[in-house]
């Protein structure tokens, strides 16, 4: 469940990048091009990246993920082949895919590092604005 829990956490705190992007393009932090903040918070986890999809630097922090398929019980480990099979898509209903166990571990590390990168950005902004740290 490490990957799934990390994915859930990352897609929750990604709101920070969305709000920061709003300010960078000249809007209030809680004003999106087509959404209110409440509508944004109701988006599907994978859709939360769209409001800053044109921001190359922010999207680099959000590399492609395998979503939270382990939360849906759709990860299957083949010990003999050292592969993991899963169904992508909402609720694990998409086409079956397979990755090596080593690749899965790399993705676990990657999402952890992406989360730490986002935390570092939050800390830098808090320091710059001289406000309480978000931890």
Image (spheres, helix red, strand yellow):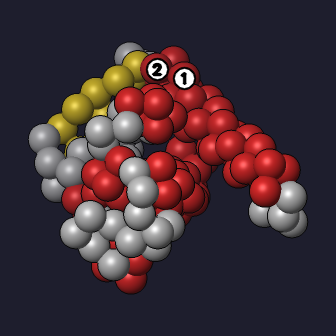
Mark 1 neighbour density, 10 Å: few (under 14) some (14–19) many (20 or more): few
Q: Secondary structure at mark 2?
A: helix
Taking the spot 84% from the left edge, 64% from the top edge, the residue there is 131
Taking the spot 84% from the left edge, 50% from the top edge, the residue there is 127
Q: Measured from the top left, where is residue 109 in percent x and y?
A: 61, 29
Of residue 104 and residue 126, the one placed in the foreground of this image is 126
* Quadrant that contains the C terminus: bottom right
Taking the spot 66% from the left edge, 37% from the top edge, the residue there is 117
Residue 75: image tag = none
Using the numbered discs, state the Cα–Cα distance from disc 2 to disc 1 in whole angstroms: 5 Å
Outermost residue toward the front? Answer: 26
Q: Is residue 131 above or below residue 92?
A: below
Of residue 30 and residue 48, the one placed in the foreground of this image is 30
Mark 2 neighbour density, 10 Å: few (under 14) some (14–19) many (20 or more): few
Mark yes or no: residue 14 visible.
no
Taking the spot 56% from the left edge, 29% from the top edge, the residue there is 110
State the residue position of label 1.
106
State the residue position of label 2.
103
Mark yes or no: residue 27 visible.
yes
- Asked if the residue at tag 1 contacts the one at tag 2, i.e. Cβ–Cβ closer than 8 Å, the answer is yes
Task: Tell me: 14 left or right of 47.
Answer: right
Q: Measured from the top left, where is residue 2 in percent x and y?
A: 60, 47
Q: Measured from the top left, where is residue 72 in percent x and y?
A: 36, 60
Outermost residue toward the bottom? Answer: 38
């Amino acid at each position: 469940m490490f990957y799934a829990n990390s994915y859930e956490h990352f897609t929750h705190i990604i709101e920070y990048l969305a709000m920061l992007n709003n300010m960078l393009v000249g809007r209030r932090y809680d004003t999106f091009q087509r959404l209110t903040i409440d509508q944004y918070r109701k988006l599907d986890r994978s859709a939360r990246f769209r409001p800053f999809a044109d921001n190359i630097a922010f999207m680099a922090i959000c590399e492609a993920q395998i979503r939270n398929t382990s939360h849906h019980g759709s990860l299957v480990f083949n010990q003999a082949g050292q592969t993991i099979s899963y169904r992508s898509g909402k609720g694990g209903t998409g086409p079956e895919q397979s990755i090596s166990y080593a690749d899965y571990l790399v993705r676990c590390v990657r999402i952890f590092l992406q989360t730490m990168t986002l935390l570092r950005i939050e800390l830098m902004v808090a320091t710059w604005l001289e406000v309480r740290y978000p931890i």
